[in-house]
Image (spheres, coloured by chain):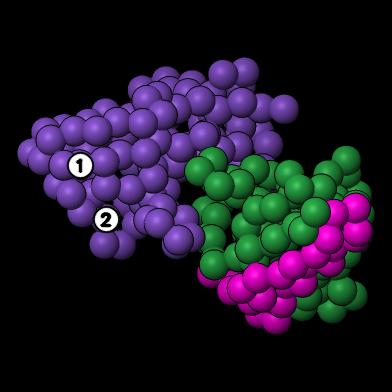
Chain colours: A purple, B green
């Protein structure tokens, strides 16, 4: 099956610093990638939809200047949490939608962000 | 987005079948029914999806009601590795679909 990776799997940073999370589709090209956030004991919340070569579409309530998304190639999307604060600590998960196959999203393993 | 309703939790025994229900009374004619599951500290994993007919794959079966207002995910012989949160999600057939996750059903498997 299709594989999506995320890097890093876990990151701890100081308050005020920026953190970049990578999402890669390893064996397929993804025209669309999605970024989700999940707080403990809660469900996944969609943050934004990322299309290759264009600006991301953010969900209501998600600050686009704080969560910078870049989808520069068909296999890579990045999420940068700028000026991170403790309330940004969460489990960040990406998913990728193969081009031409509209039915199934493939999810990455997630990145655990802890902001001290 | 059409909503789904699932029980918060279910419990079953190892090697027994499990039937996970999902209600989606406001489903539209263009909505696929998707099931994903999430093991602890992992990203969601695709399980199965369908439109109108029942579907089978190596992981599970999906039984869809004739009026499409409900569906049931069937794990034929549960193992301890099937313990996870199971999400029933509706999405459009075409286009770059958004998946809106509800709270899902937390399935516990007893040895």
Same chain letter for marks 1 and 2: yes
Q: Quadrant of residue A76?
A: top left
Residue A28 in sight in this render? yes
Decide whether residue A60 is among the magenta residues. no
Q: Chain of mark 2?
A: A
Of marks 1 and 2, the one in the foreground: 1
The residue sitting at 80% across, 54% down in the picture is B111
- Relative depth, front residue between A44 and B78: B78
Q: Quadrant of the N terminus of chain A?
A: top right
Q: Of the numbered discs in the image, which one, if any, rests on residue A115?
A: 1
Residue at mark 2: A62
Q: Crowding at label 1, few (<14), some or many (≥20) Cα neighbours within 10 Å?
A: some
For the record, the magenta segment spans B1-28
> What is the secondary structure assignment of the residue under circle 1?
strand
Q: Position of residue B102 (x, y in %)?
A: 54, 66
- Considering every residue shown, the one lying at the far bottom of the view is B25
User: Which of disc 2 and disc 1 is earlier in sequence?
Assistant: 2
Q: Relative to A89, is B8 on the left or the right?
A: right
Q: Crowding at label 2, few (<14), some or many (≥20) Cα neighbours within 10 Å?
A: few
Q: Position of residue A103 (x, y in %)?
A: 69, 45
> What is the secondary structure assignment of the residue under circle 2?
loop
The residue sitting at 10% across, 40% down in the picture is A15
Q: Position of residue A111 (x, y in %)?
A: 40, 35
Residue B34 in sight in this render? no
Decide whether residue B14 is among the magenta residues. yes
- Relative depth, front residue between B14 and A83: B14
- Considering every residue shown, the one lying at the far left of the view is A16
Q: Chain of mark 1?
A: A
Q: Relative to B103, is B26 on the left or the right?
A: right
Residue B51, above or below B58:
below
């Amino acid at each position: 099956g299709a594989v999506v990776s995320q890097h890093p799997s876990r990151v701890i940073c100081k308050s005020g610093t920026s953190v970049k999370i990578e999402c890669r589709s390893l064996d397929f090209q993804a025209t669309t990638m999605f970024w989700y956030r999940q707080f403990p004991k809660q469900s996944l919340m969609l943050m934004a939809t990322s299309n290759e070569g264009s600006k991301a579409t953010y969900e209501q309530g998600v600050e686009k200047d704080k969560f910078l998304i870049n989808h520069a190639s068909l296999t890579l999307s990045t999420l940068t949490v700028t000026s991170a604060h403790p309330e940004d600590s969460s489990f960040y998960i990406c998913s990728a939608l193969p081009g031409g196959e509209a039915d199934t999203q493939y999810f990455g393993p997630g990145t655990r962000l802890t902001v001290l | 987005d059409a909503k789904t309703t699932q029980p918060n939790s279910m419990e079953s025994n190892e090697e027994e079948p499990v039937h996970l229900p999902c209600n989606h009374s406001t489903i539209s004619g263009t909505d696929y029914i998707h099931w994903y599951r999430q093991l602890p500290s992992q990203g969601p994993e695709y399980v199965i999806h369908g439109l109108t007919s029942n579907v089978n794959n190596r992981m599970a079966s999906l039984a869809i009601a004739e009026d499409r207002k409900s569906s049931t995910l069937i794990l034929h012989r549960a193992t301890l590795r099937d313990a996870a949160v199971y999400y029933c999600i509706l999405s459009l057939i075409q286009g770059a679909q958004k998946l809106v996750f509800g709270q899902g059903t937390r399935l516990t498997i007893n040895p």
